[in-house]
Image (cartoon, helix red, strand yellow):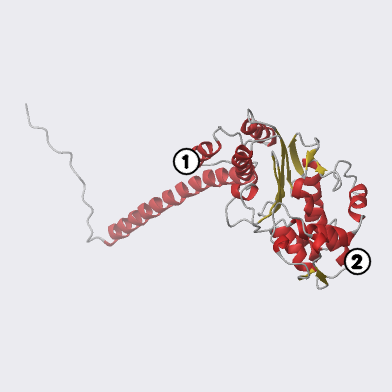
Amino acid sequence: MAPIKDFPRKRLDLKNPNNIKKYKGTRLGIVVLFFGTIVLSFLLWFKNQAKDLWQKVTAPSVYRISKSNEQELEDVLGIKPNLTGFEGVKKSTELLVQGLQGEYGVYFYQLKQNEFFGINEDQVFTAASVNKVPIIVSFYQKVDEAKLSENEIYTLKKEDVQDYGTGSMRYDEAGTVYSYLKLVELSGKESDNTAALVLLNLLGGDIEQHFKTLKMKNTSLEENTTTPKEMGDYWVKLYNFELISSKSTEKVLDVLTNTQFEDRISKGVPEYIDVSHKIGNEIQVVNDCGIILSNNPYVLCVLTRGVFEEEALKVIPKISRLIWEFAKK
């Protein structure tokens, strides 16, 4: 059998000028085709990517946490939380207090969204020192009306001293002088009972009328009562400048931030987030109500009765952490 010969390859004679033109034209065509293919491929890829990007941008916002954060949150809370919506967060909050002694009332209000949920939010609880908030606000109402001034001076009397609970003023001697502003700061930062009583006496009986005007039927200083929703909505009105001027509101929020008692709501949010709030303590009562001043601010009020203090001081930060994870988006 004859050996198979290679197929003959026709060589281009580059000495012929016509062939050189043909060669250059062929090479240019190949280059154009090559880069054209690349450009076309890029355009097709970009079209698909742009479509995906647009779908992501226009898709409804749903909060998600990474698996590592999700596990860390589950470890902290002791439950598997549901952060998919208000109903899910409410059920998770109910799980946190399930089986604990006593009763818990919770009210959560998102200010930008004007949405809220509550647990026992309309039940009447002992307010304890949470009711110092309307005392401070009522003082600044008088300031706005030019009936009182922060710079006025008060001289402590022996009968003013409330020798119980928190605050340093009760250790001062009769005759010690304070500016009204100092009385406000002591009432907010230290929850000073003597300072709050002095302010209350300066205001007379106007605060109870203040509650009636706001239709806070279950909030009373005389009875020392409120509900999670009434006190929570009071904070909403404060934040929205519905109670006092914007200047006075800023002062109230400041005096109730970075207090001596940061072991409840504020313990559940990052340290760099300001929390303006007021705690309250009595026997088997552990309360905290306030506003978390984040980019997406919200009000959280937790009131209790008949509880173990140790249990309450553990679960209130957990409730706060759960709400923070939901509301921080």
Q: In this view, does 154 lie to the left or right of 25?
A: right
Which amino acid type corresponds to the residue marked 2 in the rendered image?
Glu
Q: Position of residue 275 (x, y in %)?
A: 66, 54
Q: Can residue 3 be seen in the rendering of this structure?
A: yes
**Quarter of the figure with residue 7:** top left
Q: Earlier in the sequence, mark 2 or mark 1?
A: 1
Q: Is residue 211 left or right of residue 183?
A: right
Frontmost residue, 87 versus 213 = 213
Residue at point 61%, 39% (across, down): 315
Q: Where is residue 117 in the image (x, y as percent from the top left)?
A: 74, 37
Which amino acid type corresponds to the residue marked 1 in the rendered image?
Ser
Residue at point 78%, 54% (across, down): 133
Q: Residues within 10 Å of mark 2 (few under 14, many from 20)?
A: few
Q: Can residue 254 be seen in the rendering of this structure?
A: no
Frontmost residue, 310 versus 249 = 310
Question: Which one is in front in this view, the residue at disc 2 or the one at disc 1?
Answer: 2
Q: How far apart are marks 2 and 1 (CA)?
A: 53 Å
Q: Where is residue 250 in the image (x, y as percent from the top left)?
A: 75, 63
Q: Say which residue label 2 marks.
A: 145
Per the rendering, the mark at residue 88 is: none
Which type of secondary structure does the marked residue at label 1 adopt? helix
Frontmost residue, 150 versus 322 = 150
Q: Say which residue label 1 marks.
A: 68
Q: How crowded is mark 1: few (under 14 residues within 10 Å), some or many (20 or more)?
A: few
Which type of secondary structure does the marked residue at label 2 adopt? loop
Q: Where is residue 189 in the image (x, y as percent from the top left)?
A: 69, 59
Which residue occupies the extreme top position in the image? 1
**Quarter of the figure with residue 282:** top right
Residue at point 51%, 48% (across, down): 46
The mark tally for this picture is 2
- Of the 4 image quadrants, the one containing the N terminus is top left
